[in-house]
Amino acid sequence: MANVFQKFFGAVESFFTRGKAKEVVDAVEADLAKVADILPHAIPIVEDIAALTPNRTVQEVSAVLTKYVGPVAQQIDDNPAAIGNILLNTATAAVQKNLPPELAGAATRLIQTGVQMAVVAVNAQPASPVPAAK
């Protein structure tokens, strides 16, 4: 019975270490490495945007747009999906603008992945302890 498992897992391993599958795995690993390089540049921007939009109101989003993009003449929809997309796109543009030269040509999808991972990292941080009232 162990021989059957060895053959099965050997075939699975062989699939991921040869031919087209290996090329895909190598490409994914290269993309993840680039995202890891982008992440330290995304975290401060995501932290700033999160601090400026604690309630995600239209006014807060407008302030973020003004800071990172400039004055915006277009109406902002007051729904969570639209606001989330605006914040993602704004953070992506800000990160892209602030990347060092060696990362400047990174694909937008990788920068957005870095921004989304930064959101996860920022949200995973414990809140600052509130001092006890005296």
Image: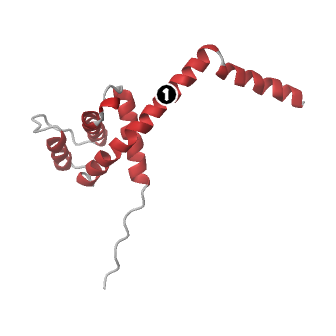
Residue beneath label 1, please? 30
99 w.r.t. 46: above or below: above
Looking at the rendered image, the quarter that the C terminus falls into is bottom left
Going by the image, does 26 lie left or right of 96?
right
Residue 66 in the image: state x and y as whole percent: 14, 42
Mark count: 1
Going by the image, does 42 lie left or right of 8?
left
Mark 1 burial class by Cα count in 10 Å: few <14, some 14-19, many 20+? few
Q: Within the image, what quadrant is residue 34 found in?
A: top left
Helix, strand or loop at label 1? It is: helix
> What's under tag 1, amino acid-wise?
Ala
Q: Within the image, what quadrant is residue 89 found in?
A: top left
Taking the view exactly as shown, the residue that stands out farthest to the right is 1
Residue 128 in the image: state x and y as whole percent: 36, 65
Residue at point 28% right, 33% down? Answer: 96
18 w.r.t. 30: above or below: above
Residue at point 48% right, 32% down? Answer: 32
Going by the image, does 88 lie left or right of 18?
left
Residue 109 in the image: state x and y as whole percent: 38, 28
3 w.r.t. 77: above or below: above
Residue 107 in the image: state x and y as whole percent: 36, 25
